[in-house]
């Protein structure tokens, strides 16, 4: 049986009632549906807690995919009380952490708009994110990039998802920004995350992560550091808040 992915349709669903299908290993909980994001695509899995009918709570320390990716496994603490399949619980995502993740993740998409170069790696975090770019004859100026990034935030562009077929995706090779990450195949459809307004979208790329609905939600953000990782590779770090005074 598969877990229904409520987080893919609504990233703002911080709580959700769900029924336990089975336990996996010692501390894995597989529900019929889930609002917890599983680790993948450069974004860490959600944490939080699940609440039983009597009000008691079981801490969730992480979330990952099951073996064939059709199930989502919430990872309880090792010493958590045993829950039996069939029990209905309320799944509470640690919203403060997740919302920072959504803001950061959306900011990473905007960074690829400002820096339209192949992405060779990315990691989203609640405090800091990093993206690796291949920039030919690269001199990247973090103050200039921050300024352009904040202009896109302030313009408050809408962010939305659209599902396309594998065939539509194959017909648009320009959608792939990431040089070594291919979107998951097999379901026949691919989730595109779009920023901007039709017909002049700022950005559209395959992504399974969680994002905010409007770029203004990102808030103040800056490029904290640009490191040289090779002849053309530049690692950029995004951080919340204004740039530190020079
Ligand atoms: Zn994304």
Image (cartoon, rainbow, N blue to C red):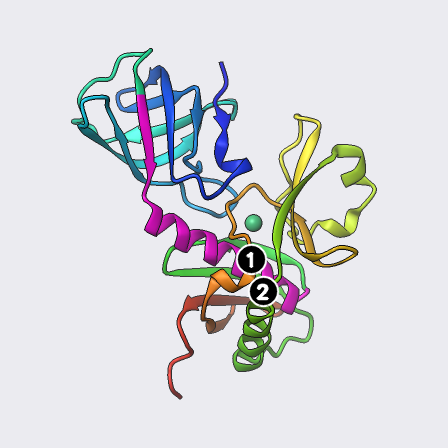
Q: Farthest right residue?
A: 171
Question: With 44 as the anchor, is 156 left or right in this view?
Answer: right
How many marks the image carries: the answer is 2
Residue 148 vertical position relative to residue 218 in the rendered view, above or below: below
Earlier residue among tags 1 and 2: 2
Residue at image coords 67%, 49%:
205
Magenta stretch holds residue 113: yes
Q: Which residue is mark 2?
A: 156
- The quarter holding residue 13 reads top left
Q: Position of residue 76 (x, y in %)?
A: 26, 29
Residue 136 vertical position relative to residue 19 in the rendered view, above or below: below
Residue 18 vertical position relative to residue 181 in the rendered view, above or below: above
**Disc 1 packing (10 Å; few <14; some 14–19; many ≥20):** some
**Circle 1/circle 2 CB separation < 8 Å:** yes
Magenta stretch holds residue 25: no
Residue at image coords 60%, 53%:
159
Q: Position of residue 129 (x, y in %)?
A: 45, 59
Residue 103 vertical position relative to residue 9 in the rendered view, above or below: below
Residue at image coords 62%, 48%:
160
Question: With 141 as the anchor, is 125 left or right in this view?
Answer: left
- Which residues are drawn in magenta? 89-116
Q: Main secondary structure of the magenta part?
A: helix
Q: Which residue is mark 1?
A: 214
Can you tell me whether the CB of the residue at mark 1 lies under 8 Å from the nearest atom of ligand 1?
Answer: no
Q: Quadrant of the C terminus?
A: bottom left
Residue situated in front as seen by the camera: 10 or 76: 10
Q: Farthest bottom residue?
A: 246
Q: Position of residue 17 (x, y in %)?
A: 37, 26
- What secondary structure is marked by label 1? loop
- What secondary structure is marked by label 2? loop
Question: With 141 as the anchor, is 20 left or right in this view?
Answer: left
């Amino acid at each position: 049986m598969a877990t229904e992915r409520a987080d893919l349709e609504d990233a703002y669903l911080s709580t959700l009632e769900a029924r336990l299908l089975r336990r996996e290993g010692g501390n894995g909980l597989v529900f019929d549906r889930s609002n917890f994001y599983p680790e993948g695509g450069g974004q860490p899995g959600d944490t939080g807690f699940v609440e039983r009918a009597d009000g008691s709570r079981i801490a969730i320390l992480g979330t990952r995919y099951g073996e064939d990716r059709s199930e989502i496994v919430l990872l309880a603490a090792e010493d958590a009380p045993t829950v039996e399949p069939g029990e209905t619980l309320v799944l509470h995502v640690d919203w403060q952490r997740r919302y920072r993740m959504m803001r950061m993740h959306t900011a990473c998409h905007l960074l690829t708009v400002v820096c339209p170069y192949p992405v060779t790696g990315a990691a989203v975090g609640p405090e800091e994110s990093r993206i690796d770019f291949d920039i030919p004859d690269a001199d990247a100026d973090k103050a200039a990039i921050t300024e352009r990034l904040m202009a896109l935030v302030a313009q408050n562009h809408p962010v939305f998802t659209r599902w396309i077929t594998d065939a539509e995706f194959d017909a648009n090779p320009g959608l792939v920004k990431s040089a070594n990450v291919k979107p998951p195949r097999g379901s026949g459809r691919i989730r595109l995350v779009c920023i901007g307004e039709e017909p002049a979208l700022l950005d559209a790329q395959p992504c399974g992560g969680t994002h905010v609905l409007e770029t203004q939600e990102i808030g103040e953000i800056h490029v904290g550091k640009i490191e040289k990782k090779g002849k053309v590779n530049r690692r950029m770090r995004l951080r919340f808040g204004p740039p530190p005074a020079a």
